[in-house]
Image: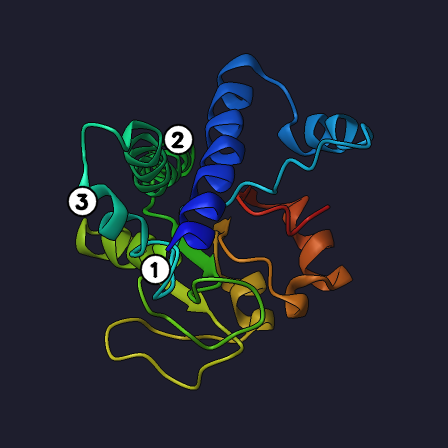
Amino acid sequence: LTENSFRDVNIAFANELSLICDEEGINVWDLIQLANRHPRVNVLQPGVGVGGHCIAVDPWFIIAQNREKAKLMCAARTVNNHKTQWVVEKIKIAVADNLANTGKKPKIACFGLAFKPDVADLRESPALQIALSLQSSGCKVVAVEPNIKSHESLTLVSLEQACTEADIFALLVNHRQFKVPSLINTCDEKTALDFCGALL
């Protein structure tokens, strides 16, 4: 429980930093790379929240024992949960901008549904929550998740199909399959929102 709570707090720092950088117009990936040049600093990479059956769950066991004392752990859980909703809102803004410019509802490709890179595990996945939230709000959503074959609620498409058909790219999980020139080059022509450093 302590190990996973520690990791949750460190992820929260990276996620909170990404929110501040977005507000200030600073490239969070460059900032973290610079900060990590210090031999005793290892800022983690921000993402779209925290998922899985451990890190997103385990802190609550410690918090439940003494909520008044577990202020930092509570704050970390709040930051990491908020990051997921913040990503949804950022994508909705891009949808509204695209609609205003083109006059038609854009198609969103959500790249990644798993809770972390290069796995098929969707448990407590913030990326999955984001895709489902967008779809339930009326957005046209397809998903690219190379580690699963189907999903009961979302339409899965290939990387190539998403690059051809989608108007907005939401990069949610940094899968190794996304590190290809075809995606990186196509992002220059589309509205690409990289929330996980997939385009670095």
Mark 2 highlights which residue? 97
- Where residue 10 sits in the image (x, y, percent)? 51, 38
- In the displayed structure, does residue 34 sit left or right of residue 130? right
- Foreground label between 3 and 1: 3
Asked if residue 192 is positioned above or below residue 180 in the image, the reply reads above
- Tell me the element at label 2: helix
Residue 192 appears in which quarter of the rendering? top right
Crowding at label 2, few (<14), some or many (≥20) Cα neighbours within 10 Å? some
Q: Residues within 10 Å of mark 3 (few under 14, many from 20)?
A: few
Q: Which tag, 3 or 1, sits closer to the chain's start?
A: 3
Q: Amino acid at mark 2?
A: Asp
The amino acid marked with disc number 1 is Val
Q: Give the image location of residue 163, x and y in percent.
A: 58, 62
* Residue 46 x/y as whole percent: 54, 40
Identify the image quadrant of the N terminus: bottom left
Local crowd at mark 1 within 10 Å, few (<14), some, or many (≥20)? many
Q: Residue at x 34, y 66 (%)?
A: 53
Q: Which quadrant holds residue 142?
A: bottom left
Residue 120 in view, yes or no? yes
Helix, strand or loop under label 1: strand
Q: CA distance from mark 1 to mark 2?
A: 16 Å
Q: Which residue is mark 1?
A: 141
Disc marking residue 172: none
Q: Please tell me the numbered disc located at residue 65.
A: 3
Residue depicted at x 70% and y 25% = 31
As measured in the structure, the alpha-carbon distance from the residue carrying label 3 to the one carrying label 1 is: 41 Å
Q: Nearer the viewer, residue 134 or 10?
A: 10
Residue drawn 61% across and 41% down? 44
Residue at 32%, 30% (x, y): give it. Answer: 75
